Image (cartoon, grey):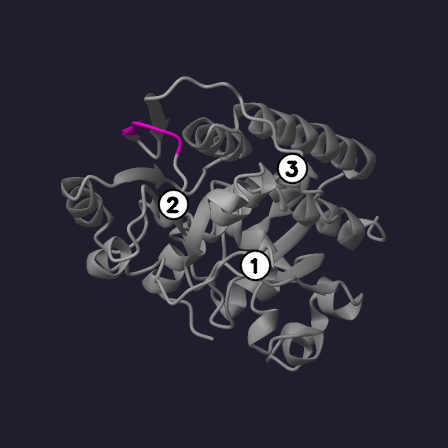
């Protein structure tokens, strides 16, 4: 897989098994509508509790179901493959189609600011009297919690959103405390086989930093311009990371393919069998399954001293 600007935007769309509250258990917050919700750099006025929600963000979809608002969702985008009972459709999160969305007669659309023409899509939908809640890829974990809170307010599930945030904070803190390395461990996070990666200025980079992992990409040329630099083979071999995380494993990359790359057989991560295939989706979604990602990293670094 070749990593491109389009893939970076798609990656931004947005981010243990989390116990989702059932609809019967989900309690209403008693929020008084209309409400004003601030999210993604925009202010959205929602006149009444929405019951025909369209989610055009995989992360937003996971958040909606996690706070018990699943029954209020009529359709989700084609990438929203979790949870399994989400009403997945052909709607695109990356290139939203106003006519296709409006035809579903939603009363709330959740849209990523990173999607194509997001501003004009938002404007067009609002002209049709459809409320649009904008979602921005978080830069840090507190932003992820803010998005959950915003969706909770928008759907009248404030109490459930608060409970989910508290659970995530508690669980993630426990994982980090029990797993954080006393001495830094160098690592490389591979986005694709052409060696695009993510620095510590990105959301995923900050997750690794919580475990005291040292990102070899931080000092690479171009690291500060986007947070997603492309490394050279020479730079990576010299950097000699102790562990390699493959987010392109779903596209065929593995410990075996990495070991066959020119010059890579002597890299510490390769010689010590510390090349890790990351699970699909979880590293690029910033909702309740962040717990899964933290736990996965914890397990991956457990045997490295």
Labels 2, 1: front one: 2
Q: Are marks 3 and 1 in contact (CB under 8 Å)?
A: no
Q: Residue 52 bears which disc, if any?
A: 2
Query: Is 115 left, or right, of 273 in this rendering?
Result: left
Q: CA distance from mark 2 to mark 1?
A: 26 Å
The vertical placement of 135 against 9, above or below, is above
Residue 89: x %, y % from top left:
42, 64
Name the residue carrying label 3.
Answer: 24
Name the residue carrying label 1.
Answer: 281
The vertical placement of 60 against 99, above or below, is above
Labels 3, 1: front one: 3
Q: Secondary structure at mark 2?
A: loop
Residue 264, quarter of picture: bottom right
Residue 219: x %, y % from top left:
49, 47
Q: Are marks 3 and 2 in contact (CB under 8 Å)?
A: no
Q: Nearer the viewer, residue 277 or 35?
A: 35
Q: Residue at x 38, y 45 (%)?
A: 52
Q: Is residue 300 visible?
A: yes
Q: Earlier in the sequence, mark 2 or mark 1?
A: 2
Q: Residue at x 45, y 38 (%)?
A: 138
Q: Residues within 10 Å of mark 2 (few under 14, many from 20)?
A: some
The vertical placement of 30 against 18, above or below, is above
Q: Secondary structure at mark 3?
A: loop
Q: Nearer the viewer, residue 150 or 196?
A: 150
Residue 100, quarter of picture: bottom left
Q: Residues within 10 Å of mark 1 (few under 14, many from 20)?
A: many
Q: Is residue 199 visible?
A: no
Q: Which residues are magenta?
A: 43-49
Q: Residue at x 56, y 39 (%)?
A: 206
Q: CA distance from mark 3 to mark 2?
A: 18 Å
Q: Earlier in the sequence, mark 3 or mark 2?
A: 3
């Amino acid at each position: 897989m070749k990593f491109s600007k389009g893939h970076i935007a798609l990656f931004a769309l947005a981010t243990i098994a989390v116990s989702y509250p059932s609809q019967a258990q989900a309690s209403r917050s008693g929020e008084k509508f209309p409400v004003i919700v601030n999210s993604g750099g925009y202010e959205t006025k929602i006149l009444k509790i929405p019951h025909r929600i369209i989610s055009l963000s995989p992360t937003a979809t996971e958040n909606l179901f996690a706070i018990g608002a699943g029954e209020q969702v009529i359709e989700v985008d084609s990438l929203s493959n979790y949870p399994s009972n989400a009403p997945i459709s052909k709607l695109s999160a990356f290139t939203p189609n106003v006519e296709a969305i409006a035809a579903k007669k939603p009363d709330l659309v959740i849209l990523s600011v990173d999607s194509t023409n997001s501003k004009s899509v938002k404007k067009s939908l609002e002209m049709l009297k459809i409320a649009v809640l904008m979602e921005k890829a978080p830069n840090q974990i507190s932003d992820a919690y803010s998005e959950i809170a915003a969706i909770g307010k928008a759907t009248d599930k404030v109490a459930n959103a608060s409970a989910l945030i508290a659970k995530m904070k508690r669980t993630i803190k426990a994982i980090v405390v029990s797993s954080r390395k006393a001495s830094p461990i160098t690592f490389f996070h591979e986005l694709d086989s052409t060696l695009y990666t993510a620095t510590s200025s990105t959301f995923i980079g900050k997750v690794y930093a919580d475990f005291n992992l040292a990102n070899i990409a931080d000092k690479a040329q171009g690291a500060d311009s986007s947070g997603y630099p492309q490394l050279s083979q020479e730079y990576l071999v010299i950097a000699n990371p102790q562990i390699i995380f493959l987010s392109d494993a779903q596209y065929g990359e593995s410990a075996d393919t990495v070991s066959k790359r020119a010059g890579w057989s002597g890299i510490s991560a390769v010689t010590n069998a510390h090349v890790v295939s990351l699970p699909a989706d979880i590293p690029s979604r910033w909702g309740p399954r962040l717990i899964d990602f933290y736990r996965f990293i914890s397990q991956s670094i457990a045997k490295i001293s």
